[in-house]
Amino acid sequence: MPSHRSRHPRVAAVAAAAAATAVVLTATPASSLTGAPVTDGSRAFAASIVFGDHLKGCSGVLVDKSYVLTAASCVSATKDRPVSGKLQEKTTVTVGRADLNNAAGGAVVEATDVVVHPERNVALLKLGVPVANVAPAVLAGQAPAAGQALLSAGFGRTKTSWVPGLLNSGQFSVTATTADAVVDLEPAGDSAICQGDAGGPLTRENAGQQELVALATGSWLGSCLGAPEGESRRGARAVRVDDLGQWIKSNVTVPGPDTSNLTEHRVLADFNGDGKADLAAVDKNGTLQVYRGRAEGTFEPTPTAVGTPGVWKTVQRVFAGDFNGDGKRDIAAVWESDRILLHAGKGDGTFATTVTLSPQNATWAKLKHLTRYKLDPASPKDGVLATRPNGELYAYKVGSNGQLDFTGGKKIWPDASFQNVIILGTGDFNGDGRDDVVGVWENGALVRWTGNANGTLDSGGLAAAGTWTDLKIVTGDVDGDGKLDIVSWKDNKMSFHRGRGNGTFEGVGVQL
């Protein structure tokens, strides 16, 4: 299969090649899927990419606020494989606009650099300016399987138009996935992938959200305007990207913190008020360190020490929330004396003098889990969630006196099955305004329980794919997109699992 871009004068040559094999889908001239226009905003992450003199173009997908993923074959003007580095010609990327002639919303940005995958027909284009108003696509995390339905999206030509200027979509069925990450596709209805669609996203629906599985790379061009005479085949090919999360993350971010000196006492919260969760952790020397969150879902490598070095050596547990109702995130800590002390946040990443959140109470030491939880969505104050020794799950409020009311707890799950849960995380994971719970079950599954209007929990099913055995988890909005995420860790490896806003998360984490 040819892997180079074609220009308008070379249409005949490309058409001739199509008689023997499926052809590349770059524009000739810069030009979509023969299907239906996308009008619902569900794939705002789709990108139009125009190279140089506007005679050649491709499609792509926003995977980070500063990076677009596309086919590597789009980047080279020759048959030679492109190399990473500065782009050799002006490259204009439009993202967040299903109609390229409508200037409302989205962004038009020039790309400056390219990172080419060493083995696949995949490349990352670095944008000169981050795109702040479009949410990046979420990687599916699971390979496409034969028989699965995928939706394509691209800005290439259609059956009737050379340059439609619209994002079009079609439906395809996976017929095979090869060992070298090639995905064979068969169209449904009149769907077809045409020139200009190379690099466009192929997505799979999961819980109402489109997740990125592959990028379009080639097709027979049947049903496309300008197709070779007599060509009716509409089968297509794509390249897998669902498993490239770590490669993408390693190229779009700078190194994060060294976690080898951190204990298991870690919490996520927006301590400095910039809209992104920060990581607070007790190091092995007993000092509380705060790592500032960054927009791409990582943390600054250099922390800020909080308070007197060494005094946190005897802490038993830590959890974060707004326990005094002032709109700023605090840290609560259970100490060896079985007191819970409140380290009230100032909103700038520092903390005020500690006060007592709960006086000495031997019961706290016996609890299996202890973390923040808001029982009453209308209250400005967070409370706590705890698993009692018998496996019953209780929620507790902070009273008007600023103290946790241990005697006034509410049982929020009917039985004692939380005895089988290894670790818990809490937050409004589905965006309904009520706190939910996620937990690692004893079989390694990450399970979700959804908060209801009665102040108790409903079973919500699996929260993410994969096995979470032996992982520790904390929750927070790491990338600042308004959806709660999970950070997991084991030993010295810490990973980011992007939240989808519907109560589920990426099962395959990206190492931080």
Image (tube, rainbow, N blue to C red):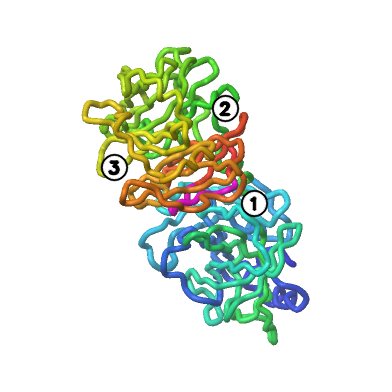
Could you tell me how far apart the alpha carbons at marks 1 and 3 are, in whole angstroms?
A: 40 Å
Q: Can you tell which mark lies on residue 376?
A: 3
Q: Position of residue 83 (x, y in %)?
A: 69, 49
Q: Position of residue 187 (x, y in %)?
A: 62, 76
The C terminus, quarter of image: top right
Q: Residues within 10 Å of mark 1 (few under 14, many from 20)?
A: some
Choose between 365 and 171: the one closer to the eye.
365
The kind of residue on which mark 2 rests is Thr
Could you tell me how far apart the alpha carbons at marks 3 and 2 are, in whole angstroms?
A: 35 Å
Residue under numbered circle 2: 259
Q: Earlier in the sequence, mark 1 or mark 2?
A: 1
What residue sits 37% from the left and 22% below the top?
340
The kind of residue on which mark 1 rests is Asp
Q: Can you tell which mark lies on residue 243?
A: 1
The N terminus, quarter of image: bottom right
What residue sits 32% from the left and 46% below the top?
455
Q: Residues within 10 Å of mark 2 (few under 14, many from 20)?
A: some
Could you tell me how far apart the alpha carbons at marks 1 and 2 are, in whole angstroms?
A: 24 Å
